[in-house]
């Protein structure tokens, strides 16, 4: 949906996902668009140009290999980052966490080298092969290439089906109060939050350059 609006998030990480409550309890929200950027014109659909030697925008732990290398980011980078978030949840720790960095060494360069040398197969060992296919696919995307979202979604749906999970928007942390719509106080808090979000002006934090 975000990419359909011509926007890259550029900071996909667990901290930027939040779950609704009450009537919105089944919705997972992506938040914090402070580092977002348009990747194409909303009028002409002209894609931004490829460039290199850029400083990292985002969080190194979940950033794509290309982003860590200093390449201009595209849709592929958001999708690759989602894969690392999923593997972080599954594994509890990613191979490039806690690397020893000596004085004078570039931390981001070490993370880049470790991430690049870690194959999708190694990263996803012990988990359904669909996760490996997801990571492998997103890593091979070209800069301007549109990801096949239906294919990627289908991989995750297959994991659900193979493990007899029902896609019913009910999560492990759901309670009876959630099913009943929550109490009146929580509904008032939700309404206040929705009003605040509607009134927010989102920009990318680059000297007032808006993402719209």
Image: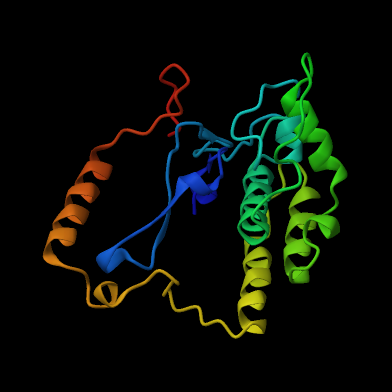
Identify the residue shown where x is 26% and y is 66%.
22
In the image, residue 6 above or below residue 55: below
Query: Is residue 172 shown left or right of residue 73?
Result: left
Residue 110 can be seen, yes or no? yes
In the image, residue 24 above or below residue 3: below
Residue situated furthest bottom in the rendering: 164
Residue 51 can be seen, yes or no? no
Residue situated furthest top in the rendering: 104
Q: Position of residue 37 (x, y in %)?
A: 53, 33
In the image, residue 151 above or below residue 209: below
Q: Position of residue 192 (x, y in %)?
A: 17, 48
Q: Quadrant of the C terminus?
A: top left
Identify the residue shown where x is 34% and y is 59%.
20
Between residues 41 and 82, which one lies in front from this camera angle? 82
Render colour scheme: rainbow
Q: How many numbered discs sit on the rendered protein?
A: 0
Q: Position of residue 202 (x, y in %)?
A: 37, 34
Query: Is residue 12 shown left or right of residue 175?
Result: right
Query: Is residue 141 shown left or right of residue 191?
Result: right
Q: Position of residue 207 (x, y in %)?
A: 44, 16
Identify the residue shown where x is 84% and y is 57%.
122
Query: Is residue 104 shown left or right of residue 203?
Result: right
Which quadrant of the structure image shows residue 48? top right
């Amino acid at each position: 949906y975000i990419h359909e609006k011509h926007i890259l998030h550029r900071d996909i990480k667990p901290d930027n996902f939040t779950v609704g409550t009450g009537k919105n309890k089944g919705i997972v929200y992506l938040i914090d668009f402070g580092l977002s950027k348009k990747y194409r014109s909303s009028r002409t659909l002209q894609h931004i140009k490829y460039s290199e030697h850029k400083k990292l925008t985002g969080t190194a732990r979940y950033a794509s290999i290309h982003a860590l290398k200093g390449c201009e980011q595209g849709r592929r980078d958001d999708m690759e980052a989602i894969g690392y978030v999923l593997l972080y949840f599954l594994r509890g720790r990613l191979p490039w966490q806690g690397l020893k960095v000596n004085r004078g060494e570039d931390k981001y360069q070490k993370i880049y080298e470790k991430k690049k040398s870690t194959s999708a197969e190694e990263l996803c060992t012990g988990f359904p092969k669909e996760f490996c296919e997801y990571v492998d696919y997103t890593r091979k995307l070209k800069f301007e290439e549109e990801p096949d979202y239906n294919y990627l979604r289908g991989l995750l749906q297959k994991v659900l089906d193979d493990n007899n999970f029902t896609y019913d928007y009910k999560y492990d942390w759901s309670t009876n109060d959630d099913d009943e719509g929550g109490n009146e106080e929580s509904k008032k808090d939700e309404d206040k939050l929705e009003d605040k979000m509607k009134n927010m002006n989102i920009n990318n934090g680059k000297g007032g350059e808006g993402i719209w």
